[in-house]
Structures are given as C-alpha cells and as structure tokens.
C-alpha cells in the first residue's frame, strides 16, 4: 500500500473504538508526524537557551548534563519500547501496534503531548530555580529526535554500512518477534538484559 495513500480507514482493525485508540489516532498522519521533527528540536534549543541565559548555569556543566541526558536516552528508548509500547492497554500501546501492522504508516506521539509534558517540566524547573534539569531533559529529548529520524530511515532505506545493516536486521527481527530486540538506535540494552533474539535462541536451545 502506498505510504501517502494510507488513511485511518486502513488501520480500523488495529485502532478499534476506545479512549486509548482515539488518543492514538491523534498521532496518525503526516501533519503530526512531521511537526514532531520541528517542535521537538525547537524545545531542545529553547531548554539549552533557558538553562544558560536565564538560569545562568555554567556552560560546561550544561554540556556535561546535556550529554548525560543524551546517553541516558538509550535506556529510556529501551524501557519505553519494552514496557510501555508493548505492555498494557494504553494509547502508546495502541499506536505502536498500528505501527507493527503497517510499519511505513506515518504515526508518532502527538506533538502537542510531548510539548505539554516538557512545557510542564520547564515551568517546574523555572519556578524552583532548579539547575540542569532542563539540560538533562534536552539531551533526552534530542535522543528521542534521533530515534525518530533513525527509525524512519530504518523502514525506508537499505544502506550498505555494516553497523546500519546490523541495526536494521535487529529491528526487522523485532517486527517478526515482538518480545525481543527492543533497542532501535542501539543493541546494548538488549544484550545486557538478555532480550536480544540471539540470547533467547541460545537459551531455548539449552
């Protein structure tokens, strides 16, 4: 099915009528999808600006905490994918299952939900005068942006770089076996927590 012609009607079986599914539908479509690639980077830039020029945090500490947030993202990505996207009856789960049914559909977390959550964090950090909360959050959110870009590319381009082909194969296996290979930008946590397909296969063979 042509990606540009995919409509909500094509996903009716996976997005049946319920509160969770109705929320998930808000993330469906090209407008919301591409807006996330605008609103999220702008939020990252705003947080760094606010941290340095309003909260007057030391730039070198802003850089350090930003990198800490970015590195932390790898585990956040794994955790969300394993325990939120694949568990329970939530809007996040419903939207992710729609993605599993149609991997090329343009569906993402509603941009205004992410903006509202991080906006609330900004308000609290500003009211409390808490330093480096925003720089850590900016690093985590940039990780989310990188994940979004990389995930989009994985489903559409077959580059020949070795590291890319390994990650693409890793994610392709996940779409066939949803209980393994939860990492998208990294395989690290799958190996550490023994949820890679290779680990499970070896365990089953014993």
Image: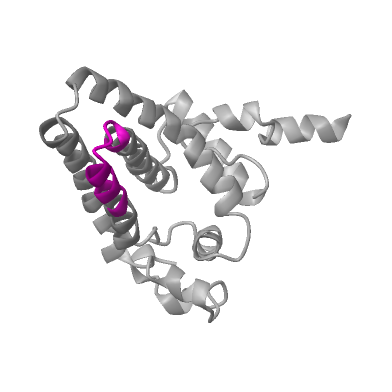
Quadrant in the picture for residue 87: bottom right
The magenta region covers 120-134
Residue 195: where, in percent of width, then height?
Answer: 67, 36
134 or 187, nearer to the observer: 134
Question: In this rendering, is residue 96 above or below 161?
Answer: below
Question: In this rendering, is residue 151 above or below 35?
Answer: above
125 or 138, nearer to the observer: 125
Q: Residue furthest left?
A: 53
For image coordinates 12% across by 36% down, the residue present is: 54
Residue 93 is a magenta residue: no
Q: In which quadrant of the rendered image does the N terminus lie?
A: bottom left
**Is residue 98 left or right of 147 when viewed as pictured?**
right
For image coordinates 32% across by 25% down, the residue present is: 65
For image coordinates 48% across by 41% down, the residue present is: 77
Q: Residue furthest top?
A: 60
Residue 63: where, in percent of width, then height?
Answer: 25, 23
**Is residue 202 left or right of 121 when viewed as pictured?**
right
Residue 177: where, in percent of width, then height?
Answer: 67, 48
For image coordinates 45% across by 68% down, the residue present is: 24
Residue 133 is a magenta residue: yes
- For the rendered model, the colour scheme is one colour
Quadrant in the picture for residue 56: top left
Residue 120: where, in percent of width, then height?
Answer: 30, 53
């Amino acid at each position: 099915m042509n990606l540009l012609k995919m409509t909500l009607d094509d996903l009716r079986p996976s997005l049946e009528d319920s509160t969770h599914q109705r929320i998930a539908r808000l993330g469906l479509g090209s407008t919301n999808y591409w807006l996330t690639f605008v609103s999220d980077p702008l939020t990252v830039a705003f947080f760094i600006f606010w941290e340095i020029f309003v909260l007057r945090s030391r730039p070198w500490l802003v850089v350090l905490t930003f990198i800490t947030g970015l590195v932390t993202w790898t585990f956040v990505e794994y955790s969300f994918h394993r325990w939120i996207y694949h568990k329970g009856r939530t809007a996040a789960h419903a939207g992710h299952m729609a993605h599993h049914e149609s991997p090329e559909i343009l569906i993402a977390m509603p941009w205004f939900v992410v903006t509202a959550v991080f906006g609330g964090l900004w308000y609290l950090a500003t009211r409390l005068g808490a330093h480096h909360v925003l720089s850590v959050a900016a690093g985590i959110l940039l990780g989310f942006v990188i994940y979004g870009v990389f995930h989009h590319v994985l489903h559409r381009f077959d580059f020949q770089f070795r590291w890319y082909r390994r990650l693409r194969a890793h994610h392709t296996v996940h779409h066939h076996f949803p209980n393994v290979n939860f990492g998208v930008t990294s395989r690290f946590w799958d190996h550490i927590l023994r949820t890679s397909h290779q680990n499970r296969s070896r365990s089953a063979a014993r």
